[in-house]
Image (spheres, helix red, strand yellow):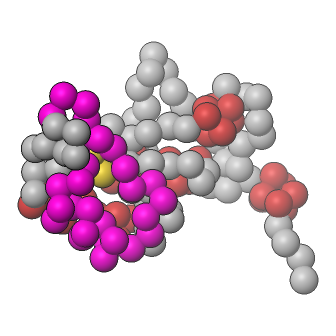
Amino acid sequence: MTAAVGNKVPICAGENEYTIWGFKNIVRSHAVNIINHDTVKCGGLWQAKKIAALAEVEQILCTPHSACSEAGLEAALHLTTSTPNCAYAEIVYPTLLVMTGETPSLLVKPLELKAGIMRASSKPRFGIELDEKTVSKYAIRR
């Protein structure tokens, strides 16, 4: 696999691409070494799996991006653990702040990061339950 600058510096992109058609162009042109699609932004787990499959055909790795929430990170973990060409799930700073207790969690039981490792839940609905009190603070009322 090579990218625009050769194979010495891996190129990772896609966190702000939203459709499988956009990813099709990136994948077919081999513009990147790693697809960094956001499981929430691209339309959910099913769309994310289709994008990863498209990349797998061209032997391109995926590292799911998950900047939207803890729920998005849990979805990215499930994508990573169930998809052969997904190496890691990316944790971005705002979610890390939740995991360290510096920002309130939207979940009844916050996700845990231990020694740099997270495990995908084996429970239904990604194993998450929203904390309605915290969520209500961010609800938009009409």
Q: Is residue 97 left or right of residue 75?
A: right
Q: Which residues are magenta?
A: 7-33
Quarter containing the C terminus = bottom right
Query: Percent x, y for residue 72?
Result: 52, 54
Q: Is residue 75 above or below residue 116?
A: below
Q: Is residue 119 left or right of residue 30?
A: right
Query: Percent x, y for residue 42?
Result: 44, 67
Query: Percent x, y for residue 120?
Result: 40, 42
| Magenta stretch: includes residue 20 | yes
**Residue 75 in sight:** no
Quarter containing the N terminus = top left
Tell me which residue sits at (48%, 59%) in the image: 16
Q: Residue furthest right?
A: 142
- Image-quadrant location for residue 102: top right
Q: Nearer the viewer, residue 6 or 37?
A: 6
**Residue 13 in sight:** yes
